[in-house]
Amino acid sequence: MNVFWTRGYHATALPDLLRATKLSRGSLYAAFGDKHSLFLRALDRYIADALARMDVEFAPDREPIDGLRAYFAGYVERNSGANGRRGCLLVATAMELAGRDADVDRRIGSFFKAMEGRVTGALSRAKAAGKLADGVEPSSAARIIICFVEGMRVVGKTAPTRIISQATVDALLDRFIR
Amino acid sequence: MNVFWTRGYHATALPDLLRATKLSRGSLYAAFGDKHSLFLRALDRYIADALARMDVEFAPDREPIDGLRAYFAGYVERNSGANGRRGCLLVATAMELAGRDADVDRRIGSFFKAMEGRVTGALSRAKAAGKLADGVEPSSAARIIICFVEGMRVVGKTAPTRIISQATVDALLDRFIR
DNA sequence: AGATATATAGACCAAACGGTCTTAAAATGG
DNA sequence: CCATTTTAAGACCGTTTGGTCTATATATCT
């Protein structure tokens, strides 16, 4: 996963994977099939990690606004310095492979859907608690937020400063909460 | 440019470029040097086109809010249907090559800076004209908007419907204008 | 028309690609 | 301690990669 993450799918060669897994060529093929299958498994793990993180952040017994803040804080962290420069496997994969690889399409599409559902849920609970600014509609606000955080991952590839990222997410949240 | 745009840098092979340019191998190398130089020229054109478009949208004699609407409308258009699935050469390049290619780094970085400057300018003029909502600060709002539109290009790779994109940009703009 | 410059097609190159297979070494089980 | 299975190392395969070079054809110019 780490190799695909830092290099991208096409730029990752078999020797890179052998070095990272400390496996021989034969063992790697016996264990994972081909490069494409291995990549899919790496992507699945990346997605599972991300969803698990969000399930903690947006846990139903938590204040939804706090959850949103934690969610944003995670993106600030992942977007700063070396983390930022490394980028996001999911975004990189979407740009590199989506539309040309049906297996990837399904995964990317369902991930964004899952994320949208979770953010919408948190915003709905916040709205029910009267914490949202006037006129904010949970589902469209969720779509805004998702585009925003994924865009951070793009911009963060070249301009990763924590202070600015933090200020930017704060300014966005300010537009949505009361 | 079109070939790199639809396939990405690594996935583009010499024969693809020969077919697209209708040049022979020798002629292509005589004209452009190597693959990397040709890619840089393609990227430069893509960036120049984008900046030229923004110079029209954010022309100083135009209502800044109208400019912003036109700017968003362009992203909705580029993000819908086949255009959306095709994606954005700049975003794809940022994810694929930034951090590993100094020539690319410079171009991506300066593009985002240029875009941020233009959006900030439009927002400042809007603020001066009293058209911005209370508490909206042009420079941080510009950073939000840039992350948002670049994120659209990512999400749009798999979920490109015009109606939703339009509704989402409208909802975002609503948070910023009076 | 004839000399010169330019562009073409494509043979050719070494290196690297993803993937398979054989052989030897290391664990493992009774 | 021997027989069996599992693992490792790496030779090997055909294909494709980015890049060069030569021979031929096509313009161009006086």
Image: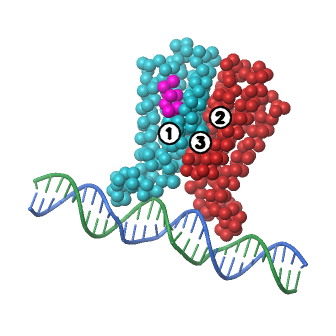
Chain colours: A cyan, B red, C green, D blue
* Labels 1 and 3 in the same subunit: yes
Amino acid under disc 1? Asn
Tell me which label, 1 or 3, sits earlier in the chain: 1
Query: Residue B73, can we see it?
Result: no
**Residue A111 magenta-highlighted:** no
Residue D2 found in image quarter: bottom left
Q: For the point 50% across and 45% down, which residue is it?
A: A104
* Labels 1 and 2 in the same subunit: no
Query: Residue A67, can we see it?
Result: yes
Say left or right for B146 vs D15.
right
Q: Position of residue C18 (x, y in %)?
A: 45, 59
Identify the image quadrant of the C terminus of chain A. top right
Q: Main secondary structure of the magenta part?
A: helix
Q: Position of residue A90 (x, y in %)?
A: 51, 41
Chain bearing tag 3 is A
Residue segment shown in magenta: A69-77
